[in-house]
Image (tube, rainbow, N blue to C red):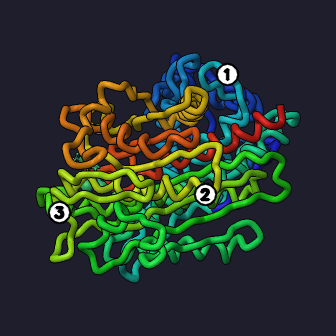
Amino acid sequence: MNFFIKNCDLEKEKTDCIVISIFDGSKLSDSAVYLDKCSNGYITSLIKLGDIPGKIGDAMMLYNVPKIISKRILLVGCGKKNAINKLRFKEILKNTIKIVKKLSIKNIVFSFSEFRINNNNNIYWMIRVIIISIKECLYKIIKINNNNSKSINIKNIILNISKKKDLFTAEISLKHALAIDHAITSAKNLSNLPPNICNPLYLSHKAKELSKKYKDNIIVEVIDIKKMKELGMNAYIAVGDGSRNKPFMSVIKYSGGNTINDKKIALVGKGLTFDTGGISIKPASHMHEMKYDMCGAAAVYGTLIMAAELQLPLTIIGILSGCENMLGANSFRPGDVLTTMSGQTVEILNTDAEGRLVLCDSLTYLERFSPNIVIDVATLTGACVTALGESVSGLFSNNKELENQLYNASQETDDKVWSLPLFSEYYKELSSDVADFSNIGKGKAGAITAACFLSNFTKKYNWAHLDIAGTAWKSGKNKGATGRPVELLCQFLLNQLNDIQH
Ligand code: BES
Ligand code: MN
Ligand code: ZN
């Protein structure tokens, strides 16, 4: 499926379908007004009949419209003209795709360029939302069988830009949207794989693949258990002890073309390819979902793909902290005391609080690169889901500016985050009689104590932590990885460049 930007003569466009919008109270959009004129008032004549919808969810397909070359015109209801925000716009697109994907439509023109999202006619964001939303609607989980052949009919999607002066911005947006979609789709595909295929070694192979595909920009180093031992990454190693699938930490070093600044940004993803809980075993009912406990690593993987596709002039270090938390004769146990790579000791009170153990050594390992910014992404705590639910990721940081930057990027992309505090009261909950701290907090604020734990390992740089336990995948009817927070991370990186240019 291909996307194109074009300044069309709508009435002359040879296509299977033109999609135009109509608002509450049968108010026509500019494109609708134009096609109405070209067709000698065909659309207004239908309005007089009272048949034309305007509410979100409404739609009407018109065939053989006089003087219009396109085979069809789809009128989609968009609700109140001044009340369209990104979420509503996405809903409108979803409804549209639902209709057209059932028909044998190969080529389609979206004429939405006069749209106002949040009362603002911003071509860049409109194109991005259209492309990313359409791709999201059409995403299908790859089945592990040989019948993945049936694909959708739509081949070409033209986005009509009514003002020629907007074409340049629209092209940039198209480029960004395609790279971000590539990132999101790659993260989803990796996350949706079963845990017997996607294990820590597999993650390292995916990382290596990047260094082949983007060989001018990406170098990958894989830290295996032998190297981890030399480095003293005992917390990370302990988590993997119960599994036949040994841990691998993949270090992806990206450096873009003519790097115009020397800022180094590190992204660390929790890559538990399966989390049984270990000796502190999880209940059976939802355990299969713990294959998604590597969604943080998948998000980092995806984000690096977008950086490489767009050749962003940045230095980025991506770490996929691959590991599997199983039970067996060699498993680590509650009561164990581990010496982390930082030298700080941890008393294990629950082997299911394993993500922080893998991450703390990854975060210490990162110090060697002297990064300016480190962001870790992890399906870290069920408590975060209790606190913020399933649409908002938890944000924690030791630096206000970084925290604001991530918040702003999340608002721009609708990949929402909300800050939770790291007050000193919470640190006390991690106290231990036998070690520097324990691996779980005593109270109820589990998302915060987990973040406090991590912050003990991030003193040397500006750091933020995204707890994506609630947002990384969906259960039930539409189950599968969401690809979050890839768009947020991509936007954060793109905004870093704007800062430099200004
Ligand atoms: N991967 C889980 C967190 C999780 C649980 C994410 C459910 C999404 C849904 C993590 O390793 C974990 O088990 N955390 C424990 C921590 C607890 C033992 C302090 C949790 O949240 O229950
Ligand atoms: Mn766990
Ligand atoms: Zn986990």
Q: CA distance from mark 2 to mark 3?
A: 30 Å
Q: CA distance from mark 1 to mark 2?
A: 45 Å
Q: Which of pointers 3 and 1 indicates the residue nearer the eye?
A: 3
User: Left of 496 or right of it: where is 60?
Assistant: left
Q: Quadrant of residue 65?
A: top right
Q: CA distance from mark 3 to mark 1?
A: 56 Å
Give the camera-side residue of 472 and 440. 440
Circle 2 is placed at which residue position?
368
- Which amino acid type corresponds to the residue marked 2 in the rendered image? Arg
Give the camera-side residue of 152 and 49. 152
- Which amino acid type corresponds to the residue marked 1 in the rendered image? Asn
Q: Which mark is residue 120?
A: 1
The answer to whether residue 60 is visible is no
The answer to whether the beta carbon of the residue marked 2 is less than 8 Å from any atom of ligand 3 is: no
Q: In the rendered image of this protein, does residue 318 appear above or below residue 450?
A: below
Which of pointers 3 and 1 lies earlier in the amino acid sequence? Answer: 1
Provide the secondary structure element on which disc 3 rests.
loop
Provide the secondary structure element on which disc 2 rests.
helix
Which of pointers 1 and 2 lies earlier in the amino acid sequence? Answer: 1
Q: x%, y% of residue 19?
A: 62, 41
Q: Which mark is residue 333?
A: 3
Mark 2 neighbour class, 10 Å CA radius: few under 14, some 14 to 19, many 20 or more: few
Q: x%, y% of residue 305?
A: 63, 61
The answer to whether residue 132 is visible is yes
Which of pointers 2 and 3 lies earlier in the amino acid sequence? Answer: 3
Q: Which of pointers 1 and 2 indicates the residue nearer the eye?
A: 2
The answer to whether the beta carbon of the residue marked 1 is less than 8 Å from any atom of ligand 1 is: no
Which residue sits furthest bottom?
A: 146
